[in-house]
Image (cartoon, rainbow, N blue to C red):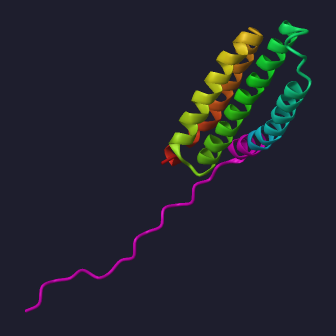
Amino acid sequence: MQPYTPPYTPPTASPPKERGFLLTAFLLLTMMGNMALVGVFLLGSAAAARLSPDPALDPAGAAFATHTHNTLLLLTLLTVANLVFLSGTWMWKQWGVYGYGIVTFAGMLAGMHVARSSVFVNLIWAIVIVMIIVPKWQNFD
């Protein structure tokens, strides 16, 4: 007598994950905007470095140009990080959502230094993002 072996049943495929129009539009538009921002920030940083006055003649102007150059390089780094995290979100990874949130919060803190009114806009934007992502959260790995 041979032991009972159940018939082979192939594993069932999980249903495809659907992003939906709002999440797809948000991710694509945000990625395209961040790609454009990388170019703008790099051009601005190069211009600030090139047009920096002589520190011996205008120390305040040179310090301002250096500060502008460094700030634009930091913004470039944050924007590239945003692209990485948005790509992770596109691939249904929770680390992409968390990373995007952290970088956006860091950008909001940096924006407070420049314009306090930007905090309100960023908070509204954060609420909209949460409302778009929460219904799809069960699809993220």
With respect to residue 4, does 32 lie above or below?
above
Q: Residue furthest front?
A: 56
Above-or-below relation of 71 to 86: above
Note whether residue 138 is visible: yes
- Residue under the image location 68 percent in, 42 percent down: 83
Residue 3 appears in which quarter of the rendering?
bottom left
Side of 104 relative to 53 (left or right): left
**Number of numbered callouts drawn:** 0
Residue positioned most to the bottom: 1
Give, as a single range, the part of the protein colored magenta: 1-29
Seen from the viewer's position, the closer of residues 18 and 59 is 59
The secondary structure that most of the magenta stretch takes on is: loop
Q: Quadrant of the N terminus?
A: bottom left
Q: Residue at x 61, y 34 (%)?
A: 100
Q: Residue at x 56, y 35 (%)?
A: 99
Residue 14 located within the stretch drawn in magenta:
yes
Q: Mark yes or no: residue 123 visible.
A: no
**x, y (%) of residue 110?**
68, 17
